[in-house]
Amino acid sequence: MVLFSCWFVPPATDICAQEPQPTFNPTAYKGKYLLVLLFSIDDPRAPMAMDLMKELYTRRRDVNMEVAAVCLNTGKDQEARRFTALHHPPFPVFLDTSGSFAQSLRITSGLGLVIYGKDGNVIATKDASPSAGQSDLSSSWKGFINRYIPIGYTPDDVPVLGYKPPFPVFEAIATNGATINIKSILGKKPFVFVIFSPSCSHCQHELEFLQTQYTSQEFKGKLEIIAVSRGDTTSTDALVKKKKLSFPVLLDTNSTITARFPSFIGSVPLSYLVDRNGTIAFQHTGFSEYTADNYLMELRKLCGLPNPPLLNPSGYSGEERCKVCHERQHIQWSLTRHADAYLSLVRKGSEHDPACVSCHVTGFGRSGGFNLEDKKTARRLEGVQCESCHGPGATSCTAFTKVKDNPRTRAQWEMICRSCHTEKESLNFKFEHRFPKVIHTAVPDLSSMSSQDREAFIQNYRQKKNLFDNPASYVGAANCKSCHEEQYRHWQTTLHATAHTTPQARSAPADKSYRYHTGVENPGGYPEPGREGVQCEACHGPGERHVKEPNKKGHDYIVSLSQECSSCVVEQICRRCHSPGDDPRFDFDAYIPRIRHPKTSTHQKK
Ligand code: HEC
Ligand code: HEC
Ligand code: HEC
Ligand code: HEC
Ligand code: HEC
Ligand code: HEC
Ligand code: HEC
């Protein structure tokens, strides 16, 4: 085990401050991902790497991660200290006094990354290639990290939400001597562009698959294929011969071709399916039997050929499959919180907890559905996908079943929703209000919008406008005091009672006033007098009906917060004001004990 002294301790850090004698001990971060930058101040890219870490640090809570750095300049203590102080990282920096740390991870270039998994073991390392410039380093590192920790990075050459990036135009010489000009292919036929390495077996399988399609009766003459080899002439020629590849193969001499693709972070195979408009319609990394079926459907779609769904006949297929044909539905679904339901568990570090996954994945506990033991297929079924609502594609996709079922009634839909949206796990689930949000036609055609309009639309669409969705008015904390004196007294000791009086609150812009007052823009809410500060009803919902009928139960009266799931409901309420943007330091598990009212208090029962 490697131990170092904590060398640079930023103010208000989470890590060093907790330990009496700060030491770098990766196993101490168990239960969280740990991202560590290794840097030498002599590398001109070190400042950029530091900035990247600072950016990722602000998002650490969203992905249950900690960030640290290790300085490799053992002999230059003074300079290294000056460098670190200048960059002022918000995370701790350790010193590799013996030089053995970098060595043990085989990081030799003076700049690298190591990722520890939640079990405290190394899951990946990356040595910065000495030739990589600043900009490719930032994107390739983000791409690399994103493979292990879902930091939400999408490279510019990946199609997303209906937007299809243009395929880059360039010229290159093929192994057979011919000049390949992308411009002359673009727009005529769909084409596949695949980056491979001759020695990689998944790449070989993909090339075999493509060769079969290329010469098949079905695709002959309808499709172009261009492959790019990361190997040298000899190994490439040998493979071309062995696999009898009849499409052009290019050599990526000095990485000039791969440098045009932000998705390329060294892993192969990487493929792009380009449509007749010259835009990237699909992109894949890796190749497996599962991908092969998707691939085939995508190729048929691009070539306008008959396209029967290739679905898992006995279980769940995963949204990747459905996306090929049900593009519009898929875009709308991607905008709903259902698509991110698994990421919410990652944020809480609960993605392996059987008590949590059931409602945050697809087909849990059902034959062929999400199974914690089966890591490979589980990945495809993360989140509340199509088949959570429609049932397995093999029974719900009418193009597959060839039987047209009667559409479900609203009552049947409601039952499906309520299997997950229970009172304990969902804040005031009102079917008639939430149902319109999942109807796929609720979203306009995003592909024809400007990127600015799209951003604005998406932000607005995802916002929860009426969190409590409660028909009552706000009445103010003074109206709770008589019956809940102890809670009232406790609340007065918290910063919430005076949140509106701080300098921060006084200088806050008007659109942030919901953070400092109660019931802003709602009936009976602020600016009504007596609603200043974060009062009872900011957490428990508007209380007018509860005050009138205190013994009536349910979220339309008052939200108890002691009976509800603290991750699904309570934290959601806190995060409306303590969002990562407004309060990056917010840590629910550390803060909530100060907010729960002391247990000696019992509310007055009649
Ligand atoms: C290869 C193309 C393709 C794939 C892949 C595909 N579907 Fe379909 N699906 C269709 C077509 C075409 C129809 C319309 C058939 C019809 O009208 O009879 C359809 C119909 C449906 C319907 C019924 C729509 C209605 O009007 O009632 C549902 C639900 C559905 N699919 C769900 C899925 C799900 C879930 C998946 C993924 C597991 C999926 N489909 C994958 C092509 C596909
Ligand atoms: C398999 C479980 C499951 C099913 C079935 C399900 N949901 Fe959800 N739903 C969730 C989870 C989990 C979230 C929260 C995701 C997150 O934020 O992590 C959610 C979030 C939502 C949201 C977003 C919250 C908001 O107010 O913005 C809406 C709306 C919603 N569901 C509506 C529905 C409707 C309507 C149905 C039925 C047609 C339904 N859900 C079926 C699990 C489910
Ligand atoms: C019975 C189904 C169910 C179970 C079990 C469940 N959840 Fe949820 N969870 C939901 C639903 C439904 C929502 C959406 C809440 C809403 O609509 O207000 C949700 C929302 C969430 C959210 C997002 C809240 C937000 O900020 O918007 C998190 C985080 C979460 N759950 C974590 C967990 C954890 C951790 C567990 C295990 C302790 C768990 N869930 C167990 C159904 C469930
Ligand atoms: C939260 C539940 C839910 C999820 C998740 C969901 N759907 Fe649906 N889907 C519905 C409802 C509700 C309808 C509308 C049924 C109606 O109007 O009677 C619908 C309708 C459809 C239809 C019929 C055509 C249409 O647009 O009305 C297709 C096809 C379809 N869904 C495919 C998908 C695919 C593909 C996904 C995943 C990308 C998906 N659905 C995810 C609830 C869901
Ligand atoms: C007239 C007396 C009265 C007033 C005024 C009153 N409450 Fe209550 N409250 C009660 C009683 C009685 C209960 C216990 C109900 C039960 O356990 O069945 C209760 C329970 C609660 C609960 C727990 C709910 C549950 O289901 O466990 C909360 C939270 C709460 N009140 C908040 C408030 C807030 C906020 C206000 C001010 C807007 C308020 N109360 C005003 C009498 C009152
Ligand atoms: C910042 C959020 C927040 C505010 C503000 C708040 N509460 Fe609570 N309240 C909670 C939470 C969280 C619980 C659940 C405690 C638990 O699980 O033990 C709770 C529980 C309660 C309960 C149930 C019994 C108990 O003590 O656990 C009552 C009654 C109550 N609150 C009344 C009030 C009243 C009255 C006020 C205003 C004077 C108030 N609360 C202000 C978060 C808040
Ligand atoms: C209506 C907005 C709002 C809600 C809801 C809310 N808070 Fe706060 N909270 C604030 C504001 C404003 C402050 C003052 C500090 C600031 O500006 O961030 C604060 C301060 C705090 C503090 C004191 C922090 C310190 O610096 O000492 C804690 C602890 C806290 N909140 C926890 C919670 C928890 C836990 C919940 C959910 C149960 C919650 N809050 C819900 C707005 C809110």
Image (tube, rainbow, N blue to C red):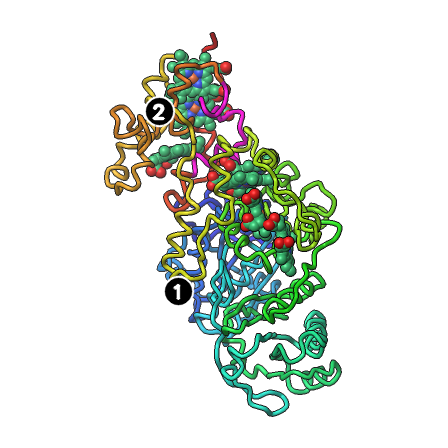
Residue 555 part of the magenta-drawn span: yes
Give the image location of residue 64, x and y in percent: 53, 47
Q: Residue at x 57, y 64 (%)?
A: 102
* SS label for mark 1: helix
Give the image location of residue 527, x and y in percent: 25, 30
Q: Residue furthest top?
A: 606
Residue 340 part of the magenta-drawn span: no
* SS label for mark 2: loop
Give the image location of residue 509, x and y in percent: 26, 43
Q: Nearer the viewer, residue 206 or 298?
A: 298
Residue to which mark 1 is pinned: 79
Measured Cα–Cα span from mark 1 to mark 2 = 61 Å
Quarter of the picture for ligand 2?
top right
Residue to which mark 2 is pinned: 473
Q: Nearer the viewer, residue 517 or 502?
A: 517
- Identify the image quadrant of residue 145: bottom right
| Amino acid residing under circle 1 | Glu
Q: Residue at x 40, y 49 (%)?
A: 459
In magenta, the rendered stretch is: 553-575
Regarding residue 342, the answer to whether it shows in the image is no
